[in-house]
Amino acid sequence: MSFWLRVNMFFRSFFLQAGWNYVKYQNLGFALVMLPFLRRLYRQDPEALPSVMNRYLEAFNTHPVMASFCFGAMARMEESVARAQSVADYKEQVAEWMGARRGLSITAASIGDRLFWGTLKPLTLLLAIFIWMLLGVDFLEISMHPVPLLYAFTAGAAAFFVYNAVAQFVRWEGLQIGYESDDKSCFGLTRFDWNRTIYNAKRIGIFFAVGLILFGVYRFFEGVRVDIHFIARAMLVLFFVMISFVTRRLRIPNVYLYIAAVIIFNIVCLI
């Protein structure tokens, strides 16, 4: 795959969902992205292009960023289809192509949904909120003062840049990795430890979320006199939260914990 062909497919990939429909999902965008490659591959046999395009207009649906792995893999496998020496060989290559398209699109969608929708977007939102905190924007006050436009833009731009730096890197590299890899490595998807990446990103998100909660609790109780009853009840809540982790690990039914919590909380409230 040449550099300029890769650039062409990369920019076309932003329009993958432009023709989204309820019948075949992203099939129009899929065909749009692959068209430059197919034209170059079948330039010696232009009459074959319409029948080839019919395969790319079948149902296709995956994560829009991780789809780049599918584009590269389908391009590699299409070269095998184009080199078929007999009708039987052609049918076998097409069957493998269709199976790889389906399996790869499902795998890429699963990874992309967990990485980008479920992890990276919430994480960048928390990043924007933390930047506002560092800039002195007190968004926890009931009567908020107008936020300077520069502050709002800085936090939003940082979140936008971080998300797209990861997304566009994966989109760009996925094309080449998918094209250069084979089915033994799931066309490059197994080159990265996606589960560990998602795990670490979620832990960072938890760190930011806990920081926000602690900051909110501090601002809520700042200057407020807290009596011993409130402290006792708060400690009980924390105690049962910690115990719930132990009971889950020991596989003790949570119903017993709930019963104990109700009894103890009623006793404490009566004292």
Image (cartoon, rainbow, N blue to C red):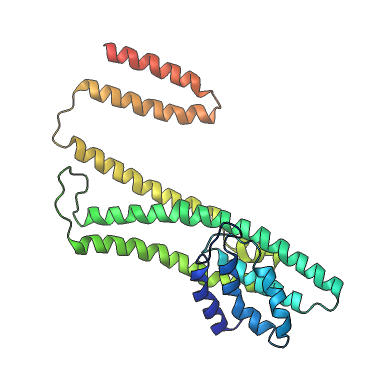
Classify 228 as above or below 145: above
Classify 91 as above or below 204: below
- The quarter of the displayed image where residue 104 is located: bottom right
Q: Residue at x 40, y 52 (%)?
A: 122
Q: Residue at x 49, y 18 (%)?
A: 256
Count of numbered circles on the image: 0
Left or right of 131, for residue 111: right
Picture coordinates of residue 106, whole percent (x, y): 62, 56
Residues 253 and 99: in front is 99
Left or right of 81, for residue 234: left
- The quarter of the displayed image where residue 74 is located: bottom right
Residues 62 and 260: in front is 62
Q: Residue at x 39, y 46 (%)?
A: 206
Task: Determine the residue located farthest toward the bottom in the rendered image.
Answer: 44
Picture coordinates of residue 245, whole percent (x, y): 47, 31
The C terminus sits in image quarter: top left
Residues 237 and 2: in front is 2
Left or right of 55, for residue 214: left
Answer yes or no: is residue 176 visible. Answer: no
Answer yes or no: is residue 171 visible. Answer: yes
Q: Residue at x 81, y 69 (%)?
A: 91
